[in-house]
Amino acid sequence: MLEIKNLSSYYGESRIIPSLTMSVPKGEIVCLVGRNGVGKSTTLKSIMGMVKTPEGSILLDGKEIIGKKTYERAALGIGYVPQGREIFPQLTVAENLELGLQVNGGKGEIGEEIFELFPIIKTFMNRKGGNLSGGQQQQLAIARALVSHPKLLILDEPTEGIQPSIIEDIASAIERVNKELGITILIVEQYLDFVLSVSDRYYVMDKGEITLNGFTKDADSQAIQAKMAIG
């Protein structure tokens, strides 16, 4: 599905990622974990074409996407939920969802599966996004990314600032999106218990490089925590 090979990423003249290689196989949930500031969000922005990536390769279904603009990558089937959610607070829930259709040129409709995954969304269709709680905004942000029917969904810190009961709802929704809708998922996260509970494989990042990776079913959470604690 997604193959990153020897990728370098820059903010301005500062190289954040020196040479990254990782993969997200079709049909899997993959998590990328690490401390703050090690390059996790930069990795996602690199995939979306939002930072400079002068070296290396990003392949989606075997086709090179480096050089394509962000909206072109979205049109190829990548749904992206950034850290902080970035919903439009002055628009209603319905209007926020409709913006997700712009990836497909405004065509299509909001499928009933969205409301099955996130029942609270249907209840609040006429409420402004800014009046939702943090957990409700996160559900809206994920729903907005799903209305375009992506084949790869990218989530940046989906549990940030969210109460535990809502985190459980989001975990359940992520698993259903993967299993029932057949969408491959890449999650960046610091909450280790959350991602290990939903993912098929993991990567640990430090200073822009992968220091540990493997299948989640074989994961040693203490070893991963130790890697994440290294400064």
Image (cartoon, rainbow, N blue to C red):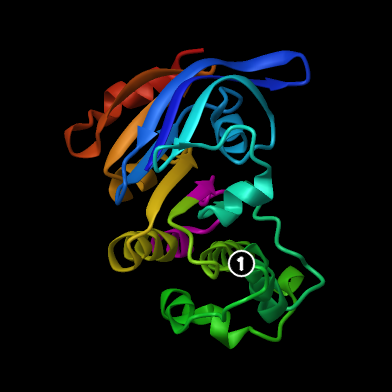
Q: Position of residue 141 (x, y in %)?
A: 60, 62
Going 60% across and 32% down the picture, which residue do you hit? 46
221 lies above or below 226:
below
Can residue 82 be seen by looking at this rendering? no
Q: Position of residue 38 (x, y in %)?
A: 56, 22
Circle 1: residue type: Asn
- Mark 1 crowd level (few <14, some 14–19, many ≥20, 10 Å Cα): some
Going 41% across and 66% down the picture, which residue do you hit? 169
Going 69% across and 30% down the picture, which residue do you hit? 51
Q: Position of residue 154 (x, y in %)?
A: 50, 48
- State the image quarter where residue 88 is shown: bottom right
Q: Quadrant of the N terminus?
A: top left
Can residue 95 be seen by looking at this rendering? yes
Range of residues picked out in magenta: 154-168
Tell me the SS state at disc 1: helix
In the rendered image, the residue lying farthest to the left is 218
In this rendered view, identify the residue nearer to me: 42 or 72.
72
In this rendered view, identify the residue nearer to me: 163 or 208.
208
The residue tagged 1 is 104
161 lies above or below 169:
above
211 lies above or below 199:
above
Going 67% across and 77% down the picture, which residue do you hit? 93
Q: Is residue 129 magenta-colored?
A: no
